[in-house]
């Protein structure tokens, strides 16, 4: 029963303006694409319920009906999310309502809250990476200061076109060890953003790390 239930939550319905065009998927019941559903303001995407970081961020945002739709017959959901403090557990609440039919639907406000929670978890993982691999550079920063640094580093990295957590972590490492000087190095900045035929900004960041 649990396996069958998990298959029914492989798709989640979210506001269409939050869906990149290439991520639209067919509704499991109708076979139609998201823009052809009865609610054109919403669309269907794959639900990463197998990702502990997604589940740890999403579950606290759900109302009772949504919670019931996710839980199905389960009595407890357990996950390990480094970005949310490690082991997380969500016991089944008593007197859950009957779960609604159809895909789990997440509203616009919840999507924004989820983005913030995922960003905070990502920054926590980057901060942990810096503590482990750049301990001397990070030793003078307390957790609050390091979190602020990681947030600022992430902003400058996104301005350069970095998209992956790995690339953002490498950029934060370089920023920390150079005391921010690398962000003002025109040669490095030009290398990352120019000549797209030679690779994406993320690819360029991986190359820079290999040269260290």
Image (spheres, rainbow, N blue to C red):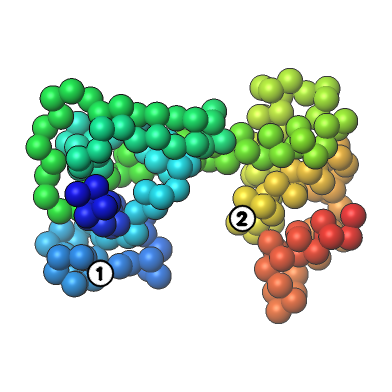
The residue that label 1 is drawn on is 26
Image coordinates of residue 102 in percent, x first then y, are 15, 53
Residue 164, can we see it?
yes
Query: Can I make out residue 190 in this image?
Result: no
Tell me how many marks there are.
Answer: 2
**Separation of disc 2 and disc 1 at Cα?**
27 Å
How busy is the neighbourhood of tag 2: few (under 14 within 10 Å), some, or many (20 plus)? Answer: few
Residue farthest toward the front in the current orientation of the protein: 1
Residue sitting nearer the eye, 54 or 194: 54
Q: Mark 2 points at which residue?
A: 164
Quadrant in which the C terminus is drawn: bottom right
Crowd band around label 1 with a 10 angstrom C-alpha radius: few (<14), some (14–19), many (20+):
some
Which residue: 11% across, 50% down?
101
Q: In this view, does 207 lie above or below 142?
A: below
In the drawing, does residue 101 fall left or right of residue 211?
A: left
Where disc 1 sits, the SS reads loop
Relative to 13, does residue 151 appear above or below in the rendering?
Answer: above
Asked where in the image residue 144 lies, by quadrant, the reply is top right
**Residue 6, percent from left and from top:** 27, 51
Q: Residue 4 carries which label?
A: none
Q: Which of 199 and 75 is in front in this view?
A: 75
Question: For the view shown, which residue lies furthest in the bottom direction?
Answer: 197
Q: Is residue 151 above or below residue 9?
A: above
The percent coordinates of residue 161 (x first, y second) are: 65, 59
Determine whether 124 is above or below 205 in the image: above
Residue displayed at 26% across by 32% down: 75
């Amino acid at each position: 029963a649990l396996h069958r239930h998990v298959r029914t939550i492989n798709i989640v319905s979210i506001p269409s303006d939050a869906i990149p065009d290439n991520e639209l998927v067919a509704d499991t019941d109708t076979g139609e694409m998201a823009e052809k559903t009865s609610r054109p303001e919403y669309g269907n995407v794959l639900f990463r319920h197998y990702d502990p970081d997604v589940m740890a961020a999403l579950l606290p945002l759900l109302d009772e009906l949504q919670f019931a739709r996710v839980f199905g017959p389960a009595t407890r959901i357990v996950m390990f999310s480094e970005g949310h403090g490690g082991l997380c557990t969500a016991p089944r609440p008593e007197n859950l309502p009957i779960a609604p039919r159809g895909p789990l639907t997440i509203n616009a406000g919840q999507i924004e809250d989820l983005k913030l929670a995922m960003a905070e978890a990502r920054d926590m993982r980057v901060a942990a990476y810096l503590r482990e691999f750049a301990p001397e550079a990070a030793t003078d920063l307390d957790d609050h200061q390091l979190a602020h640094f990681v947030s600022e580093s992430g902003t400058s990295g996104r301005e350069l076109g970095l998209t992956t957590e790995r690339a953002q972590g490498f950029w934060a490492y370089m920023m920390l060890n150079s005391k921010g000087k690398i962000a003002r190095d025109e040669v490095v900045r030009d290398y990352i953003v120019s000549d797209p035929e030679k690779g994406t900004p993320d690819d360029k960041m991986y190359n820079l790390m290999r040269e260290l």
